[in-house]
Image (tube, rainbow, N blue to C red):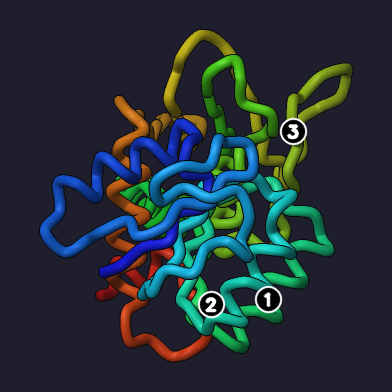
Amino acid sequence: MRIILIGYEGHMGREVRMSAERRADAEIVCGVDPAAEAGGICVRSFSDCRAEADVIIDFSHHALTAELLAFATERKLPLVLATTGQTEEEKALIMEAGKKIPLFLAANYSLGIAVLTDLVRQTLTLYPDAEVEIVEQHHDRKLDAPSGTALALFNAVKEVRPEAKAVPGRSGAGKRQPEDVGIHAIRMGNTVGIHEVIIGTPNETLTLRHEAHSRGVFADGSLKAAAFLMGKEPGLYDMKDLLKG
């Protein structure tokens, strides 16, 4: 599996490179990073990346979305999009690209988070009247809040409860409404990622929690997603598809 890695010199780019080195079936053949010094297999622009490849993994910045999608569709390469924070316009471009190439899109590439998301859906089916709150914690350098994963967990709630309403950073006076789902963001230190979904009734509370100990978990997941895309038809794929095999 020959990989073009976008965001080659970033924190996650380095993690993907280390994870790929541990696998016998993965090789980084080109890295694209506009902020890096070109050298070796790393280049600064998409046009300079001419290596033969099987798949693209992106851990860069959503500002590159339009250029990245144009590059992937022109090369007809499957794309693992592991960057969050896209604008509505960028999301529309992703939907269009999914009609032309296999495109894997996930807010979080941890398999543990995929299991957590599935558990949220299952639990709320059993507790239709329970109150739900989501708490996420990340390092102090993270730009977006709530995290993409917290929003994905809310979307899992909404699959079971279409009337659910996100209430980010609850504050001020006002009674909690039955459809409210509070989403709370904590930013401090070097926390890799902690996500909790708290489900409570008058008689009991169930807390579903996932903690990432290193960023390597996301790199491993992105490589699994890349392998999953091999041979797939154009379309949008996600972690639910990966868990199904």
Q: Residue at x 56, y 53 (%)?
A: 157
Whether residue 228 sits left or right of residue 64 in the image: it is: left
Residue that numbered label 2 is attached to = 236
Q: Residue at x 54, y 80 (%)?
A: 75
Query: Answer yes or no: do the residues labelled 2 and 1 have beta carbons within 8 Å?
Result: yes
Q: Is residue 43 visible?
A: yes
Q: How far across and how far down the image is residue 66, in percent?
A: 74, 64
Foreground of the two, 65 or 155:
65
Q: Kindly report the distance in space between the C-alpha atoms of the residues bearing marks 2 and 1.
A: 8 Å
* Among numbered discs 2 and 1, the one appearing first in the sequence: 1
The three-letter amino acid code for the residue at tag 2 is Leu
Whether residue 208 sits left or right of residue 197 in the image: it is: left
Q: How far across and how far down the image is residue 219, in percent?
A: 34, 45
The three-letter amino acid code for the residue at tag 3 is Pro
Q: How far across and how far down the image is residue 57, in percent?
A: 45, 58
Q: Residue at x 39, y 31 (%)?
A: 207
Q: How far across and how far down the image is residue 109, in percent?
A: 40, 50
